[in-house]
Amino acid sequence: MTPRHVTIGAGSTLGGADAVISDAVCFGDLVLCSGRAPVDPATLQVLGDTFDAQAARVVADVEAVLAAAGSGLDLVLRVECFLAQASDFPAWNRIWRERFAPPRPARTTVVTGFAVPGILIELQVTAAVRRDAP
């Protein structure tokens, strides 16, 4: 079995053609997404001044990567969430309930610092591939 590397091209937050990592790697029935941060792929500038704005951008970015991999939010098995501030944990729980339907995926949330100033959230997900996906 050979891994399949997935890129969302111009929508990638990982540097487009100069990307040093894949947006996701599919192996068997799994999609392993790289961490997604609220960064404009063209300028590499942080998008959104609020936690809610950044979280919306990150979840939409995750959705785009999953779609390109033949998956979706409904097939997410595990989410690793990294927050810059513990005070954003209640907002993350609200967004979590809004975007991930029960039964929700397994989840870990960690408060940490980021290399890029201004980032408030990053998500990394593992999902299943749709049975009818290529």
Image: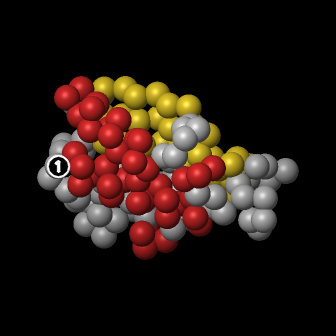
Q: What residue type is labelled 1?
A: Thr
- Residue drawn at x 78%, y 49% is 28
How many residues crowd around disc 1 within 10 Å: few (fewer than 14), some, or many (20 or more)? few
Farthest residue toward the front?
102
Mark 1: secondary structure: loop
Q: Circle 1 sits on which residue?
A: 50
- Residue drawn at x 47%, y 35% is 80
Figure check: 97 above or below 130: above
* The one of 103 and 85 positioned closer to us in this rendering: 103
* The one of 57 and 119 positioned closer to us in this rendering: 57
- Residue drawn at x 17%, y 49% is 50
* The one of 101 and 61 positioned closer to us in this rendering: 101
Q: Position of residue 81 (x, y in %)?
A: 41, 36
Farthest residue toward the bottom?
10
Farthest residue toward the left?
49
Q: Position of residue 46 (x, y in %)?
A: 22, 55
Q: Position of residue 87 (x, y in %)?
A: 19, 29
- Residue drawn at x 40%, y 28% is 109
Q: In which quarter of the image is residue 96?
A: top left
Figure check: 129 above or below 122: below
Figure check: 49 above or below 126: below
Q: How many marks?
A: 1
Q: Position of residue 54 (x, y in %)?
A: 26, 52
Farthest residue toward the right?
1
Mark yes or no: residue 132 visible. yes
Identify the image's colour scheme: rainbow, by chain, secondary structure or one colour.
Answer: secondary structure
Left/right of residue 23 with respect to residue 37 in the rendered view: right
* The one of 35 and 88 positioned closer to us in this rendering: 88
**Which quarter of the image is occupied by the C terminus?**
bottom right
Mark yes or no: residue 126 visible. no
Left/right of residue 21 with respect to residue 61 in the rendered view: right
